Image (cartoon, rainbow, N blue to C red):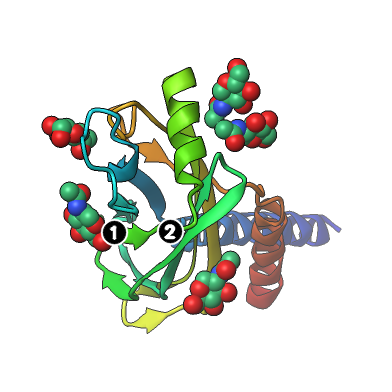
Amino acid sequence: MAGDGDCARCCFSFVFTSGLAALFLWLSLRPSKPSFYIEDLSVPGLNLSAAERSNHSILFKVGLRNQMKDKGVGYGDISLLFLYNSTLLVANHTLPAFYQGHGKTAHRIDAADAAGVPWSAAVAALTANGSVRFGVRAATRVKFKIMLWFTRSHALRVAGDVEVGPSGRKLNKKSIKLKSGAAEPHNLWLTFGVATLFTFFFL
Ligand SMILES: *[C@@H]1O[C@H](CO)[C@@H](O)[C@H](O)[C@H]1NC(C)=O
Ligand SMILES: *[C@@H]1O[C@H](CO)[C@@H](O)[C@H](O)[C@H]1NC(C)=O
Ligand SMILES: *[C@@H]1O[C@H](CO)[C@@H](O)[C@H](O)[C@H]1NC(C)=O
Ligand SMILES: *[C@@H]1O[C@H](CO)[C@@H](O)[C@H](O)[C@H]1NC(C)=O
Ligand SMILES: *[C@@H]1O[C@H](CO)[C@@H](O)[C@H](O)[C@H]1NC(C)=O
């Protein structure tokens, strides 16, 4: 009888320990998505102090940061959409796919053709209010490189607003971090699911 109890206790602690080990293994292997920043943005066509405002493009500098010390990130083509007043789509630009190593930050400086901005209304709104808002939406797919292998690809969709001032430039000097609208509620369940699976596998 005593032997049975010992066995059950031993069995329980084995299950518990391997479950915990699996949980920590999963947590340490779990990749985190890279961060996306608007580091600078300027619209020469909205520079109220310039005599000539015929340049209808949006000049921008974006930053992509992989904060993981042990995993690389493979980005697919990056789609950037710019929305005047956060509502009207005015530019559709694509940045090419690339690979990013551990803990690296990449910067991209480029110009998007924004012929669709209602230029005279925008100049009027800027003159009246001191700022106009541009929405930026970024979308891509990322794969994580763990040692030699790539995971399957995951969608990355983030967005944010940029206030542009009377010089046509981003008002706030600080970088703007784009955020994903949707939370990721399945992550915790996935974690427990995998921990449970590992436990049964070890049994
Ligand atoms: C706006 O135009 C003025 C005059 O041409 C120029 O000095 C200034 O650098 C421009 N500002 C931006 C943000 O391009
Ligand atoms: C005008 O637009 C082009 C892209 O079309 C850009 O490369 C250039 O820097 C812009 N000029 C100014 C003065 O911002
Ligand atoms: C910007 O959009 C808001 C609605 O989201 C609207 O009320 C406002 O008039 C728009 N402003 C301009 C300058 O188009
Ligand atoms: C942006 O351009 C790409 C390629 O030209 C196109 O496939 C995509 O549908 C466009 N997106 C929007 C929102 O218009
Ligand atoms: C500018 O101000 C007017 C009136 O206060 C407002 O209706 C409009 O939406 C504002 N535009 C922007 C782009 O904020």
Which residue is at the front of the view, 149 or 90? 90
Q: Which residue is mark 2?
A: 115
Amino acid marked by disc 2? Ala
Amino acid marked by disc 1? Ala
Identify the image quadrant of residue 53: top left
Relative placement, left or right, of 195 versus 153 is right
Which residue is at the front of the view, 49 or 109? 49
CA neighbours of label 2 inside 10 A, class few (<14), some (14 to 19), many (20+): few
The label nearer to you, 1 versus 2, is 2
Q: Which residue is mark 1?
A: 111
| Res. 106 visible in picture | no
For image coordinates 39% across by 50% down, the residue present is 36
Relative placement, left or right, of 8 versus 66 is right
Q: Is mark 1 within 8 Å of ligand 2?
A: yes
Is residue 119 placed above or below 145 in the rendered structure? above
Relative placement, left or right, of 22 versus 187 is left
For image coordinates 63% across by 47% down, the residue present is 181
Tell me the quadrant of the picture where the C terminus can be found: bottom right
Alpha-carbon span between mark 1 and mark 2:
12 Å
Q: Is mark 2 within 8 Å of ligand 2?
A: no
> In the image, residue 135 lies at what x, y percent?
51, 44
> In the image, residue 136 lies at what x, y percent?
48, 49
Query: Taking the image as four quarters, which one is ligand 1 found in?
Result: top left
Which residue is at the front of the view, 59 or 99? 59
For image coordinates 29% across by 50% down, the residue present is 54
Identify the image quadrant of residue 96: bottom left
SS at badge 1: strand
Q: How many marks?
A: 2
